[in-house]
Image (tube, helix red, strand yellow):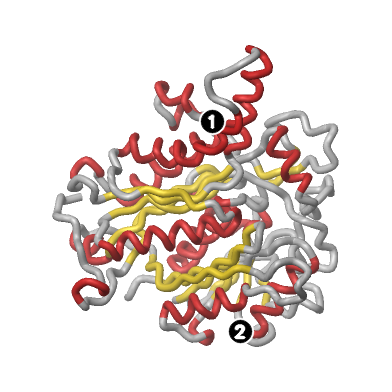
Amino acid sequence: MTATTTRTRTGARDGAPPAEAVVTGIGVAAPNGLGTPAWWRATLAGESGIRPLTRFDAGRYPARLAGEVPGFDAAEHVPNRLLPQTDHMTRLALAAAQEALDDADVAAAELPDYAAGVVTAASAGGFEFGQRELQALWSRGGSHVSAYQSFAWFYAVNTGQISIRHGLRGPSGVLVTEQAGGLDAVAQARRQVRKGIRVLVTGGVDSSLCPWGWAAHLAGGELSESGDPATAYLPFTEDARGHVAGEGGALLVLEDADAAKERGARVYGSVAGYAATFDPAPGTGAPSRLRDAAALALADAGAGPDEVDVVFADAAGRRDADRDEAAALADLFGPRGVPVTAPKTMTGRLAAGGAALDTAAALLALRDQVVPPTAHVAGPAADCPLDLVTGAPRAADLRTALVLARGRGGFNAALVVRAPAP
């Protein structure tokens, strides 16, 4: 990348339109493929990464399936000096960040100081880091860092490792909104681009496949207890019985569109619109505000519902939550009014990494003009009036995609991505 001065174009300061943020790099660590090419091939082929847990002995637990990233050798992706300082989640994030920056052909050392930063999402990975501290406390009778302290600053350490390794000295931050976090992080990165920051590494990678983390998943009461990978996670169906937890996610390189064009970068698409809402408190009887998030994101993108060509659904895998999402989409687009897919049925729900991985899938769907399938699902229930893409990929004319996510605690997020102009 050719070094240039940091841009300072913002509509608030000089009346110019906000800078357009485009994605120029993708890095993936997913249960059905390590690296973007392997994961995307598996996704289009309907190959699932859900299988019995191997990271620890889950034989005593009622839920024993998970989406684990296969074939990950940390020593191949992380410098030896960083191995003692990191846990599994951070190592996955470092691998995805390296792939994304290589894919974007960004040379951070050639950028001006403070022209590049990192904004990611996390929600559960601190469990493994904290468990390691608890084990140290138990075995040594004490430690200079408590498990609670390590959990509190773990997220900043995770993002900081990416910043330090690549010399990204600009703005940094971590969003903690569970499954919605991946979209919230991309939106925050877009804000930084609009403020004049040239390059942001953004998205989310998460992992909590350890006994302490698994106890928290089980306490939530939303894990499927099926032992069959083909039936454990069936969103929008009569047989929905919860979800499967997984690890991994995606990191993206977000750039100022003019800067990307100037250096001849390949562009996957633009982040055209975003919105977030919060659900009412439980027990109030008020409806979910997921539809509002989607409508506001479309308004932010200057697009109508008729311009959306595909929706990447949150797909909670619980009958009540699935009905709510289907009703929101039917109200916005009409019953079966737009193709809907949930490729996360091949990975499980990845907490903060899930929506980021869906965003990567949306961008590649726009590139290849194909909608990936919702694996294992034959068709939606009657009370989920969706045009759900199942069985095989569906070729389609795709220009605009909507990605939805809901996080525990009432977080809703929606992101609109557009294909590059021809």
Residue at 50% of width from left, 37% of height from top? 153
| Dot 2 or dot 1, earlier in sequence | 1
Residue at the spot of label 1: 87
- Disc 1 marks a residue whose amino acid type is Asp
Q: Position of residue 290 (x, y in %)?
A: 62, 73
Residue at 33% of width from left, 35% of height from top? 164
Circle 2 residues within 10 Å: few <14, some 14–19, many ≥20: some
Q: Position of residue 252 (x, y in %)?
A: 41, 53
Against 10, residue 166 (above or below) is above
Residue at the spot of label 2: 332
Q: Quadrant of residue 12?
A: bottom left
Between 79 and 214, the one lying in front of the other is: 214
Between 407 and 142, the one lying in front of the other is: 142
Residue at 58% of width from left, 26% of height from top? 146
Residue at 67% of width from left, 44% of height from top? 67
Q: Position of residue 375 (x, y in %)?
A: 69, 60
Against 281, residue 334 (above or below) is below
